[in-house]
Amino acid sequence: MADKADIHLETRAGLPEDLRWLVAKYPREDWRAHDNVHGMASMWLQRHDMFRELGGMLTAGIGDYREGRMDAQQFARWFAPRLNHFLGNLDGHHNVEDHHYFPVFAKAESRLKRGFEILDADHHLIHEALERNADSANAFIQALQENEDKQRFAADAYADENARLVAMLTRHLDDEEDLIIPLILDRGDRELVGSD
């Protein structure tokens, strides 16, 4: 069993080996061709791809602003709706996973229960990072009305929070997929939904 440092979201390099037996049976490169990829697995992968894309857009946008490719007002108009969409959808997605899917999946395959506990702990860390991200984004938006030094300082603070959140999210999404998608491929949607 891995120690706490090995499973902490910001320090782990992936899921512990004892939780990777299904992903070894169903490697990532084979997922798209599997008969059970349609439905729940496909939906999961699409949602995760959307979060990766939105995180990348926010990272690129703050870079564009910091490099002078967008002025403060252009950036504020571009940034606010995308950030709200990203943060709101991510929080909602995690709530559905925590309260519905993770308990169903852990019940369907008890050997993965600890994996779902790790993912649940990730959600708490990500939620805290979402709050920090929103706070630093709000401070940044307010600073866009201030002088250049305050704007630059607030932009740097937001960029740091965003980079931390995106790194946490990237690790979490990969690990979550490595736990969940092989389980869905192995059991199929009907068996998993029926195990609730």
Image (cartoon, helix red, strand yellow):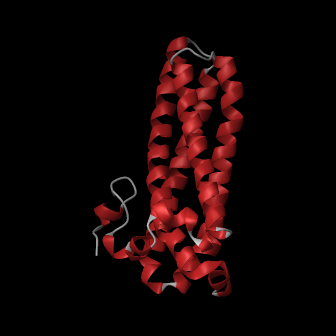
Please say if 150 is above or below 10: above
Q: Position of residue 39 (x, y in %)?
A: 68, 69
99 or 172, nearer to the observer? 172
Report the residue that reaches farthest toward the front. Answer: 33
- Location of the C terminus by quadrant is bottom right
Please say if 66 is above or below 170: above
Q: Position of residue 179 (x, y in %)?
A: 47, 70
How many dots with numbers?
0
**Which quarter of the figure has residue 92?**
bottom right
Q: Position of residue 186 (x, y in %)?
A: 53, 79
- Location of the N terminus by quadrant is bottom left
Left/right of residue 105 with respect to residue 1 in the rendered view:
right
Q: Residue at x 69, y 28 (%)?
A: 78
Q: Residue at x 43, y 75 (%)?
A: 22
Q: Residue at x 46, y 60 (%)?
A: 29
Q: Can you see residue 75? A: yes
Q: Residue at x 47, y 85 (%)?
A: 110
Q: Can you see residue 176? A: no
Please say if 60 is above or below 27: above
120 or 38, nearer to the observer? 38
